[in-house]
């Protein structure tokens, strides 16, 4: 079953938007938008940073 909830988008919004999330994770805005479009964060270290800052489970960001 396809997951219709984009948890990456929710996390980025909780952090304060794409620019803040990019600064937090030390990545470009383009990378954040790639994560948003794909609905997952492939790098576990970056996913852990975003999950901790947003207060959500890292597995929701990994698409697993």
Image (spheres, rainbow, N blue to C red):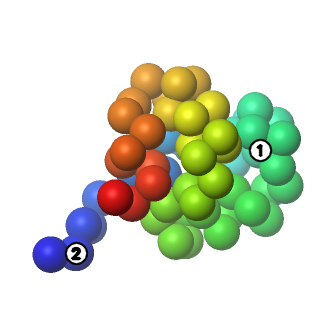
Residue that badge 1 annotates: 22
Which is nearer the N-term, disc 1 or disc 2? 2
* Residue furthest out toward the bottom: 1
Q: Which mark is residue 2?
A: 2
Q: Is residue 63 left or right of residue 34?
A: left
Q: Is residue 5 left or right of residue 31?
A: left
> Residue, x 84% and y 41% (percent of image)?
26
Q: Position of residue 22 (x, y in %)?
A: 77, 44
Q: Quadrant of the C terminus?
A: bottom left
Give the camera-side residue of 30 and 61: 61
Query: Which quadrant holds residue 3?
Result: bottom left
Give the camera-side residue of 45 and 11: 45
Task: Name the secondary structure under disc 2.
Answer: loop
> Residue, x 59% and y 46% (percent of image)?
44
* Residue furthest out toward the left: 1
Near mark 2 (Cα within 10 A), the count class, few <14, some 14-19 or many ≥20, is few
Q: Position of residue 46 (x, y in %)?
A: 66, 43
> Residue, x 67% and y 64% (percent of image)?
33
Is residue 50 visible to us here?
A: no
Q: CA distance from mark 1 to mark 2?
A: 27 Å
Near mark 1 (Cα within 10 A), the count class, few <14, some 14-19 or many ≥20, is many
Q: Position of residue 59 (x, y in %)?
A: 38, 45
């Amino acid at each position: 079953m396809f997951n219709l909830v984009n948890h990456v988008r929710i996390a980025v919004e909780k952090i304060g938007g794409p620019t803040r999330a990019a600064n937090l994770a030390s990545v470009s805005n383009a990378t954040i938008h790639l994560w948003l479009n794909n609905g997952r964060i492939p790098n576990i270290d970056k996913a852990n940073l975003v999950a901790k800052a947003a207060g959500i489970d890292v597995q929701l960001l990994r698409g697993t």
